[in-house]
Image: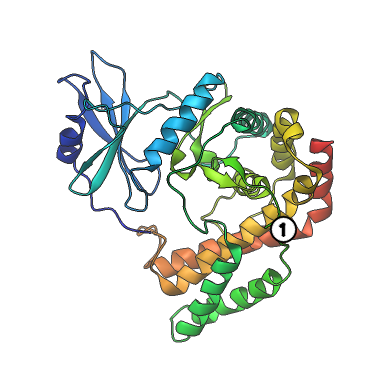
Amino acid sequence: MPKLLPATLEDAKHALSHWDIGTDTHIEAISIGNLNATFKTYSLDHPSYILQRLNPIFSPSVNEDIFAVTNHLAQKGLLTPKLIPTRDHNLSVVIDEACWRLQTFIEGSCYSQLNGSIQAHSVGEFVGRFHLALEDLNYSYHFTRSGVHNTQRHVERLKLALDAHKDHRLFTQVAPLAYELLKDAEQLPDFSKLPLKHSHGDLKINNVLFSPSQEAICVIDLDTLGLLTRPFEMGDALRSWCNPAGEDATETYVDIDLFEAALQGYGEIARPLWSKEEVEFLLPGYQTIILELAARFLADALNESYFGYDRSRFPASGEHNLLRGEGQWNLYLDAKGNKHNLMKVVDRSFS
């Protein structure tokens, strides 16, 4: 993950000068996401906006995709952030090789975990409406992230990390988990024949906004829009939604009540969009996504070159990513052990 240099308030003010939103605008840095530098604007004469400096992994062309998809969503009646064109009618501005954009601000709350079945049902239902709205979108993406969920590529990177870092201080802790994971990875199914569909690409719970009544109202962080198989799209969502412990814990598990509530809400809207084969691959997709993330964390526990880490809790990134890898591996094992019960939930939700 390319690391952003700190974006100062002065940088943000200079970027904001390319938009016509008044001269009395106040800017405040906010902590949203791990990639882009984000600021919120305040003004007596204009509504609030979200100003972002994009991480270099995103090309400015990603804004063309966001513009097209959000316009389509809005036409379908969904609440969505909208890009604000610059004074020169561009979707973004590049300053010193950094891309800046301005979006509408949507009032709502983000959560790091679901707060019960009512919220789970609501987020599932909203994502169902999101997918339904995209079903007739006719659009070719300008920006694509190659191999985002290429599980075998991530597995191979874990193998390479094990071979390259046998002298690493954490090798004896990483290796036993990694070798067990690699055994299970040999049994993963082939998803390559499933259709690719318009997807958000990163439906973790903190990319969903909720109203004060705990109703899911909007998805944010749209840089990951693209084509993806639905079992991977929803598998990644359920991985985030239904593990109350989160990614920074080892005692992870699947909350079956949340799993059922979320899928019931989703199925009520999106059931007709799924083929029988896609439904059959939903649970394997869920398990594969968990295993894939475990492989990525364990590889970086040795490589220490991609994921960030909490410096207040860990001496280095390796220790944090080992914990994350253990957590995802335990989540995978719990999902695997509960396969029969989870499959019953899938069948009920899509029947």
Q: Position of residue 3 (x, y in %)?
A: 31, 57
Residue 70 locus on image (x, y percent): 47, 29
Residue tagged 1? 334
Q: Is residue 278 above or below residue 284?
A: above
Amino acid beneath label 1: Asp
Q: Would residue 328 be found to the left or right of residue 16 on screen?
A: right
Residue drawn at 47 percent across, 53 percent down: 145
Task: Tell me where residue 269 sits by quadrant.
Answer: top right
Residue 250 showing in the rendered view: no
Helix, strand or loop at label 1? It is helix
Task: Identify the residue at image location x=53%, y=82%.
Answer: 172
Q: Residue at x 58, y 70 (%)?
A: 155
Q: How is the image coloured?
A: rainbow
Please say if 211 is above or below 55.
above
| Closer-to-camera residue (270/344) | 270
Q: Which one is nearer the viewer's eye here, 205 or 118?
A: 205
**Is residue 98 depicted above or below 294 in this figure?**
above
Residue furthest to the bottom? 167
In-front residue for pair 208/141: 141
Is residue 36 shown left or right of residue 340?
left
**Is the residue 123 above or below the residue 303 in the image?**
above
Q: In the figure, residue 29 lies in which quadrant? A: top left
Q: Position of residue 236 (x, y in %)?
A: 61, 49
Quadrant where the N terminus lies? bottom left
- In terms of image quadrants, where is residue 347? top right
Question: Nearest the camera: 27 or 233?
Answer: 233
Mark 1 nearby-residue class (10 Å; few <14, some 14–19, many ≥20): some
The residue located at (61%, 46%) in the rendering is 233
Quadrant where the C terminus lies? top right
Q: Position of residue 281 (x, y in %)?
A: 75, 52
- Disc count in the image? 1
Res. 308 in view: yes
